[in-house]
Image (cartoon, grey):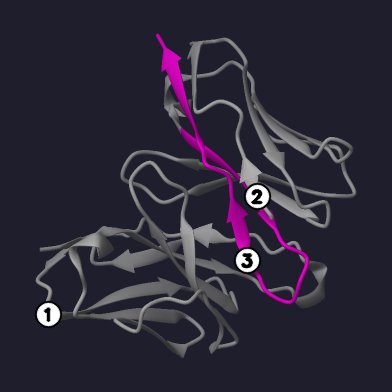
Amino acid sequence: GESVGLHLPTLSVQEGDNSIINCAYSNSASDYFIWYKQESGKGPQFIIDIRSNMDKRQGQRVTVLLNKTVKHLSLQIAATQPGDSAVYFCAETVMDSSYKLIFGSGTRLLVRP
Amino acid sequence: DTEVTQTPKHLVMGMTNKKSLKCEQHMGHRAMYWYKQKAKKPPELMFVYSYEKLSINESVPSRFSPECPNSSLLNLHLHALQPEDSALYLCASSPYKGETRTDTQYFGPGTRLTVL
């Protein structure tokens, strides 16, 4: 069935280091992917998105990489800061008439001072 | 501005109560969503409204009743809930670009619901 999953449930990094959060998806028909950041007690916050016709997209301190061959998505955060500590979800849209957003299980990022 | 607002922030209700959650956006988005999120889990889709019409109901129990009075407002009416319905209820909206399929959903802060 369709699923979006993450390899690591918790990632601990030193402040200033780069972080890489990975995500695997199983539906080859998915054409749009989003990364969300969710801080404790808050709703998911949009970080960056990527379409399936791209393999890389950069934002401010963040880069998303898409490898359609192996159905893999990653979020790279440069110079990780304490404020980056949160749960990160990848999500995909399903190619049908609905607007369902399929979420991965989430990765908690802990930034050590 | 990509702001979705939700009220109340917190709600405690008994199993016999009737309450409503409210969501509002003024971004001109034409699709609005309700999600339920349990602790340490991803959001789970409940309902989708597009152009004020219910387009998706993910087999949600009838004790949850959505309503979309206009393109900016989305309500979730609650009645006879169970303790296991306690969760964070998230509202989201998206532009609904039809065939382009790149429809980013923006989330509100959520309502933390506790059912006693």
Amino acid bearing label 2: Ser
Q: Name the residue under label 3.
A: A100
Tell me which segment is drawn in magenta.
A87-113
Chain to which the residue tagged by mark 3 belongs: A
Question: Which quadrant of the figure has residue B68?
Answer: bottom left
Task: Determine if residue B41 is in view.
Answer: yes
Chain to which the residue tagged by mark 1 belongs: B
Asked whether, in this view, residue B61 is left or right of residue B14, the answer is: right
Q: Residues within 10 Å of mark 1 (few under 14, many from 20)?
A: few
For the point 84% across and 35% down, the residue is A70
Asked if labels 1 and 3 touch by Cβ distance under 8 angstroms, the answer is no
Asked if labels 2 and 3 touch by Cβ distance under 8 angstroms, the answer is no
Seen as rendered, the residue at the extreme front is A1
Q: Distance between the residues labelled 3 and 1?
A: 31 Å
Q: How far apart are marks 2 and 1 (CA)?
A: 36 Å
Do pointers 2 and 1 mark residues of a single chain?
no
| Quarter of the image that includes the C terminus of chain B | bottom left
SS type, badge 3: loop
Residue A4 is one of the magenta-drawn residues: no
Q: Name the residue under label 1.
A: B17
Question: Which quadrant of the figure has residue B88?
Answer: bottom left
For the point 50% across and 28% down, the residue is A9
